[in-house]
Image (spheres, rainbow, N blue to C red):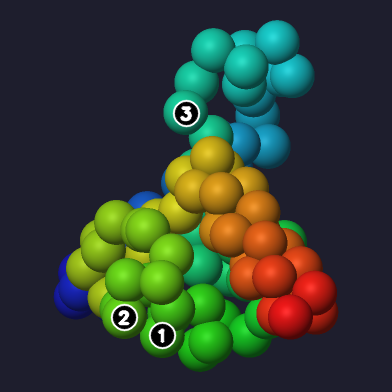
Amino acid sequence: MNIADGLAKIERYLEDREKALKDDEVSNCIKTYTTGEAAEILHVSRQTLSLLAKTGKIRATKLGQGWIFRETELKSFLEREERKRSNHESA
């Protein structure tokens, strides 16, 4: 198995794991998302989200060639962006 196959397998595992958890179990876990899932949530492309992670504008963990995003960081990122826009519009 090459690295790309291994990463694909990990991403499938993470997707399957999240789908299998019940809502009450999820509340006791650290909820994470793959690049594709997080990009969909933020309504950006996977490439844009990868660039944001690579440049440190959003915190993520590099796993092979992909990224893993915590739900809490997605929320924090959205809040920071909303504050920026709010400050920009009021100036």
Label 2, label 3: how far apart the Cα atoms are: 23 Å
Badge 2 marks a residue whose secondary structure is loop
Where 11 sits versus 42, above or below?
above
Q: Is residue 25 left or right of residue 50?
A: right
Which x, y percent locates residue 22? 71, 19
Residue 5, by quadrant, is: bottom left
Q: Earlier in the sequence, mark 1 or mark 3?
A: 3
* Image label count: 3
In this figure, which residue is indicated by the disc labeled 3?
Answer: 30
Label 2 neighbour load within 10 Å: few <14, some 14-19, many 20+: few
Which x, y percent locates residue 66? 35, 70
In the image, what residue occupies the spot 50% across and 21% down? 29
Which x, y percent locates residue 10? 37, 54
In this figure, which residue is indicated by the disc labeled 2?
Answer: 55
Badge 3 marks a residue whose secondary structure is loop
In the image, what residue occupies the spot 62% across and 21% down? 26
Q: Earlier in the sequence, mark 2 or mark 3?
A: 3
* Residue sitting nearer the eye, 62 or 75: 75
Give the foreground label among 1 and 3: 1
